Image (spheres, rainbow, N blue to C red):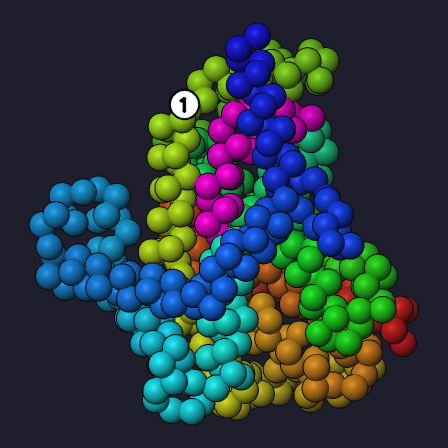
């Protein structure tokens, strides 16, 4: 009975927090969004100060560890992993701190301290995601470490193995992304890979195809792009495009070339044939209770939670803010993406996309930051074009200002060149679906 309660109680709390729609103040939301909203209201304007304070602390500790090789950091394995980094990561962390200080104190070039650049990144992004990560990291083990992954994963296994060639537990990563945030689902994937529950190929495929932006963000994207009134139809085509990409992309290089071995080096032995003959529901229950028996106690729970939080605060946030700032600068104040898009203007015109020249830079700008295609759509009058660009904001999935940084700083063996190829593959697969949908719904 104790093992059953160790499975049921934490898992129920995780389901209520991450996966259960709740009507709150007249809107449909989820528990973690209510908690983060309360936290933001509690801190008020101090959230920005906390963000910049974290960036300063990260840069100082990284300089001490990387440049001066301070002993107390080098002797502590966790601190060394977080702060002793290559020169490129040191540069990004310092840059993120400098940009943050410039915006906070309104010093430096007006281009960086303006609301279009500094405000969009440090208020529009950082202030929004910091509370989400804090509560997600604290509460995520409720879903991952007490048997719920085993229970739901076993039930979803037939569909996910047959359609996506992935274990059933990856359904939880996908659902958490859809209703919570892409980064939360990604953190679950990384955690499960490090725990030996995914092979390298499985973890890389899940991270790059199922860490989809959340439904609330999708609604924001549609509203910003001016197609909020078409949300249901638009989102239907977005889901269709994402499913096709999730089916096709893992079957192509570079994902198809990733090792079918676990982090321990052991090969994938396939599903446990001793259990496949049993009733699926009974098997799911047995697996969940077995996992609950080895679940962490209170001390272990908080050790996992704090480790996840430190990874985000110190390893991801500074670099993400630096890249988001650079993405906004490159997109709106340089012709780089305009040059890259020249060969594709004719293809968009052939597909009868209005304002093809204005829209084409957004095909690639989303690699740096997910908001960029939707922001570009705000300057375009055509609903057909806005439908497509808003869809790309959601479907391309690989964006360096958040997901890309987390992947590169994680144990997943995905390089920057891998992410570029996967981004281009997803764009090539999802764009035709969005074009067809745009002509049907908004044409």
Q: Residue at x 57, y 16 (%)?
A: 5
Provide residue 194's location: percent of width, then percent of height.
41, 37
In the foreground, 211 or 56: 56
Give above or below for 198 relative to 439.
above
Check residue 355 for magenta coloring: no
Provide residue 306's location: percent of width, then percent of height.
37, 41
In the foreground, 422 or 412: 412
Report helix, strand or loop for mark 1: loop
Provide residue 380's location: percent of width, then percent of height.
74, 85
Q: Quadrant of residue 317?
A: bottom left
Give above or below for 67 relative to 5.
below
Residue range corresponding to the magenta coloring: 133-155
Q: Quadrant of residue 395?
A: bottom right
Q: Is residue 387 left or right of residue 64?
A: right
Q: Residue at x 82, y 78 (%)?
A: 383
Check residue 146 for magenta coloring: yes
Q: Residue at x 56, y 76 (%)?
A: 365
Q: Residue at x 66, y 74 (%)?
A: 374
Give above or below for 234 relative to 160.
below
Q: Is residue 434 left or right of residue 342?
A: right
Count residues near mark 1 (Cα–Cα under 10 Å), then give few for <14, some for 14-19, many for 20+: few
Please tell me how many numbered marks the rendered image carries. 1
* Magenta stretch: helix, strand or loop mostly: helix
In the foreground, 290 or 72: 72
Is residue 150 in sight in this rendering? no
Which quadrant does the N terminus fall into?
top right
In the foreground, 237 or 288: 288
Provide residue 279's location: percent of width, then percent of height.
72, 13
Q: What residue sits right under mark 1 in the picture?
A: 297
């Amino acid at each position: 009975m104790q093992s059953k309660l160790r499975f049921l109680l934490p898992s129920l709390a995780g389901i209520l927090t991450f996966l259960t729609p709740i009507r709150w103040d007249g809107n449909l939301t989820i528990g973690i969004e209510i908690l983060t909203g309360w936290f933001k209201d509690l801190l008020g304007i101090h959230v920005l100060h906390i963000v910049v304070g974290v960036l300063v602390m990260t840069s100082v500790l990284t300089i001490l560890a990387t440049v001066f090789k301070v002993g107390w950091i080098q002797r502590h394995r966790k601190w060394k992993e977080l702060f002793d980094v290559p020169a490129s990561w040191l540069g990004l962390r310092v840059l993120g701190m400098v940009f943050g200080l410039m915006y906070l104190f309104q010093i430096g070039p007006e281009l960086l301290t303006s609301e279009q650049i500094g405000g969009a990144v440090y208020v529009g992004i950082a202030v929004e995601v910091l509370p989400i990560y804090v509560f997600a990291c604290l509460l995520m083990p409720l879903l991952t470490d007490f048997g719920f992954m085993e229970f739901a994963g076993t039930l979803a296994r037939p569909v996910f193995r047959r359609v996506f060639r992935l274990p059933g537990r990856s359904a939880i990563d996908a659902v958490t992304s859809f209703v919570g945030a892409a980064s939360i689902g990604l953190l679950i994937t990384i955690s499960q890979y490090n725990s030996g529950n995914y092979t390298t190929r499985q973890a890389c495929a899940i991270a790059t195809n199922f860490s989809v932006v959340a439904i609330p963000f999708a609604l924001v994207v549609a509203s910003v792009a001016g197609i909020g009134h078409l949300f249901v139809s638009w989102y239907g085509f977005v889901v269709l495009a994402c499913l096709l990409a999730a089916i096709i992309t893992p079957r192509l290089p570079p994902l198809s070339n990733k090792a079918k071995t676990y982090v321990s080096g052991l090969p994938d032995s396939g599903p446990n044939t001793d259990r496949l003959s049993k009733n699926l529901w009974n098997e799911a229950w047995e697996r969940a209770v077995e996992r609950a028996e080895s679940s962490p106690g209170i001390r272990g729970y908080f050790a996992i939670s704090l480790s996840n939080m430190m990874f985000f605060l110190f390893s991801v946030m500074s670099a993400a803010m630096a890249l988001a700032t650079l993405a906004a600068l490159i997109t709106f104040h340089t012709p780089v993406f305009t040059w890259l898009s020249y060969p594709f203007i004719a293809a968009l015109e052939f597909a009868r996309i209005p304002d093809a020249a204005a829209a084409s830079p957004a095909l690639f700008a989303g690699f740096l930051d997910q908001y960029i295609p939707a922001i570009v759509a705000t300057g375009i009058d055509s609903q057909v074009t806005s439908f497509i660009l808003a869809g790309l904001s959601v479907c391309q999935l690989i964006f360096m200002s958040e997901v890309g940084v987390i992947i590169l700083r994680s144990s997943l063996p995905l390089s920057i060149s891998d992410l570029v190829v996967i981004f281009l593959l997803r764009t090539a697969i999802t764009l035709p679906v969005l074009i067809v949908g745009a002509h049907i719904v908004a044409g």
